[in-house]
Amino acid sequence: MLWITSLSSGVNKKIFLGDLELRMISAEEAWNECLDIIKDNISYQKFKSWFEPIKPISLADNTLTIQVPSQFWYEWLEEHYYSMLRSTLAKVLGPEGKLEYSIVMEKSEHFEHNRSIRLPQRPMGPVEPQEMNGGYKDYYPERIENPFVIPGIKKTKVDSNLNSSYVFDRFIEGDCNRLARSAAMAIADNPGSNSFNPLFIYGPTGLGKTHLAQSIGNKIKQKFGDEKSVLYISSESFTNEFVHAIRNNRASEFSMFYRNIDVLIVDDIQFFSGKEKTQEEFFHIFNALHQDGKQIILSSDRAPKDVPDIEERLISRFGWGLSADLQMPEYETRYAILERKAQDNGIEIDSEIIEFIAHNFKSNVRDLEGAIIKLLAHASLQNIDDIDLAMAKRVLKDMVKESNTQISIESIQNYVCDYFGIDTNKVREKTRKQEIVEARQIAMYFSKKYTKSSLKTIGLHFGGRDHSTVIHAISTVEERVTTSHKHKKMLDELQQRIEVASL
C-alpha cells in the first residue's frame, strides 16, 4: 500500500492509492484509531490508567500531538510503551508517522487551556505497520503490573493503616446507628458493587464513625485478602501527602497511587474545607475510583450539605450513594456498650454502677469508655477487688461534673427525648404527633424549673415558639401530674435523672 500525506488546515489527508480510498482524518480520529489498536494489546486496567486520560491536540505534517497529564506520564509512556506506540502510529499514519507529547505543567478547568510544553518521541528509524493481534513481547502483556510499583514509590504492598481492634463484633448496634451499621456490613460483603457508593457516615465526635469505617476495611481484608487493596487515611494526612507530592514534583505518582486503591476510606472529610487544590485532586480521584467500581467510604462530623467551604461538585458526589448519621446513643445502647467494655477487660461490674454511668455520660461513646477505664484504673492502683456504687460516684465525680457542668435547655431536651426514645431534633420541629408534643411540653416544663432562661428563650430552643406556647405547655404538664398517676410517675423518673446528672 502506498501512503501519501498532505497538510490542509491542520488536518491530514490520507490517500490510499491501493484501493483509491480518499479520506480526511482529524487528530481525534487518528488517536481513536490508535486507541482501538492499543486496547486490543494491553490489559483493560493498563488501558484505563495510562491511555484514556490522554487527549489528542493536533495532527500536522504527519505528526500527531497528544496531551499527557505530567512529565512523569511522558517518561512512563516512553519507557514502557515506546515500541507499541511507534508501531501503532505506523499502522494509522504510515511509516513516517511521528508522535509529539504536550506535557501539562499547569492545569486549567478546560484541558485546551492547560499550560504545557512539547517534547517529541525519541527518534527512531521508519517503522512499518505491523499486525498486532499477538501483542508486544517486549511489554510482557501477560504480566499484570503492580500499580504501586512506579518510580518514586518503593512499596509493593499497600499498608491499609487499619486498626485491627475496630471490627463489627465490637461495634454495639442500637437505634442510634442501625442504618449506618447495616449499610457498612453490606458494603463489606460486596465492596464497589452496591448502591452505597460512596458511604458517607456523619455525626458528632466520639460516636464511632472511625470504628465503623475501619470495620468495613477489616472485614474486606479478612474476606478478600490481598485481592483488594484497602486504604484508611485521615483527610489531614491526605492533604499533607498531596502537598509533599507537589513539592517534590510527584503529583502524578500521588494521583496514580490513589486511583488504584480498591477501597478508599477517608476520615474527617470536613478538614478539606477551604483547601481548594486538595479538593480538586480528590474530586478527580473520586471520579476515577467511582467510575471503575471502586468503593469509597467517607466520614464527617456533619452532613454533606453542611460541610463548609467544600466545592459544590464534591458535595454533589458525596450524595451519590448513602448518607447515614450516627446519633447520640440511647440509654439501652449506652448500657450495652458499658457491659461490653467491662467484658473486654475481663471484669464484672454491678448493674447499678453501669446504670449510674449510663445515666450520667450521654454525649458520646468515648466518655462512656473513659469512665470505665478510670474506674478500673483506680481499683487496680488501690488494690480494690469489689467496686461498689459509692466508690464509682466518688471516683467519677469530677467526670460527671465535667459532663454535666450545668443543666441547660439542650441537656434537658436530651434527657427527655432519651426517655421517650425519639430524636432530639423532633421536639424542635413543627409536628403535632402526640408523643412528640408530650415530650416537647415536658422538656419545656423542666427547662423552666431547672434553668433561669426566660419563657421567650425557652421557646426559641424549641423551634422558635413564642412564650404563650411555653406557658401552655407548663400548665398542661402541671395539670396532668395532678390528675394522672402515670404522668406523675413518669415526671418523677425524669426529674430523678436530671437531678442525678446535676450532682
Image: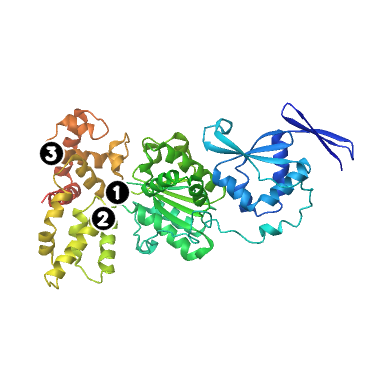
- Inspect the image, locate mark 1, and give the three-letter code of the amino acid beneath it: Thr
What residue is at 11 percent from the left and 36 percent from the top? 452
Q: Nearer the viewer, mark 2 or mark 3?
A: 2
Which colour assignment does the render follow?
rainbow
- The three-letter code of the residue at mark 3 reads Thr
Among the two numbered marks 1 and 3 on one chain, the one whose residue lies closer to the N terminus: 1
Dot 3 crowding, Cα within 10 Å, few <14, some 14–19, many 20+: some
x and y percentages locating residue 189 in the rendered image: 50, 59
Q: Residues within 10 Å of mark 1 (few under 14, many from 20)?
A: some
Q: Can residue 491 be seen here?
A: yes
User: What mark, if any, has residue 205 been given in the picture?
Assistant: 1
Dividing the image into 4 quarters, which one contains the N terminus? Answer: top right
Residue in the foreground of this view, choosing between 71 and 410: 71
- Which residue extends farthest top? 9
The residue under label 2 is 366
Residue 260 drawn above or below residue 247: below
Mark 2: which amino acid?
Arg
- SS for callout 3: loop
Q: Are marks 2 and 1 in contact (CB under 8 Å)?
A: yes
